[in-house]
Amino acid sequence: MTSSRISATNLLRETFDTMGSLYAPLLTINFPNLILSAINSLDNLGSAGVAFNIIYWFVAVPLLSGAMIFYTYRSLTRNQVTVGQSFNQANRRLLPLILVYIMSSGLALAGFIALIIPGLYVSYRLIFSLYATVIDNSSALDSLSSSWELTKGRWWLVFRASFLIIFVVSVPIVLMILLISSTANLLASKLAGNLLGFLAGPLINVYLVLLYQRLRESAATIK
């Protein structure tokens, strides 16, 4: 298998086919994110808001992302783990996950500051950094290097595949938020957006883990 044979639409079909048994556990793993994002939407945290956002974005997000990635990858590779075991693995790898998250976000931000195109390029070259951290127990630097190597010569594939899943998920969410915002207040539309994003999160996660698997399989056949 080569990267040219990896079909974004086939991945989407496979995602829907495999979501049944994964959906509820992934929602369970990501449930804290729903609560935290709802609190963040209140906009009345005052001086505590800065500390809350730091904890949310640089601790909770890497932790929950790592747990979801680990659970999905192990399940798809027929090495089933529990929700608790996935949290334990992410917690054991929390410091590297935080470092990788900060480093990849910082590098992508630097690219966006330079120009939009470099920012997009770096973002998608490093998109799988967290995966190596939580799945292979790689160090922060090795995780960045692993993602960079895995996506070498495949940036366009990763970009268009990611665009497809984001488009499929985002269009219904945006339409529903617009509908809600026309009949309710701003807070209600924010909370609805958080809920819809929470419900769509497992779909995006499974899709990207499948893409990660296919890229690894493709890389293995080339070596």
Image (cartoon, rainbow, N blue to C red):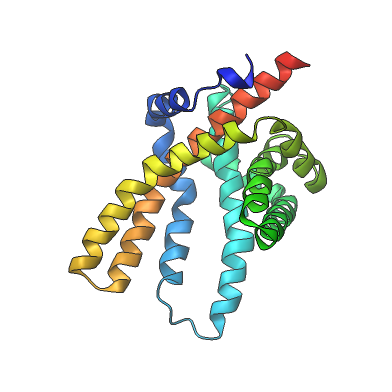
- Residue at 43% across, 82% down: 44
User: Where residue 174 sits: x, y (%)?
Assistant: 32, 54
Q: Is residue 191 left or right of residue 203?
A: left
Q: Identify which residue, 145 or 188, lies in the foreground.
A: 145
Q: Identify which residue, 115 or 165, lies in the foreground.
A: 115
Question: Which picture quadrant has residue 127?
Answer: top right
Question: Which picture quadrant has residue 101?
Answer: bottom right
User: On screen, 103 above or below 201?
Assistant: below
- Residue at 56% across, 38% down: 159
The answer to whether residue 84 shows anywhere in this view is: no
The answer to whether residue 198 shows anywhere in this view is: yes
User: On screen, 93 above or below 106?
Assistant: above
- Residue at 45% across, 22% down: 10
Q: Is residue 143 left or right of residue 174?
A: right
Report the number of discs. 0
- Residue at 32% across, 51% down: 173
Please identify the quadrant where the C terminus is shown.
top right
User: Where residue 41 sits: x, y (%)?
Assistant: 41, 71
User: Where residue 89 sits: x, y (%)?
Assistant: 66, 43
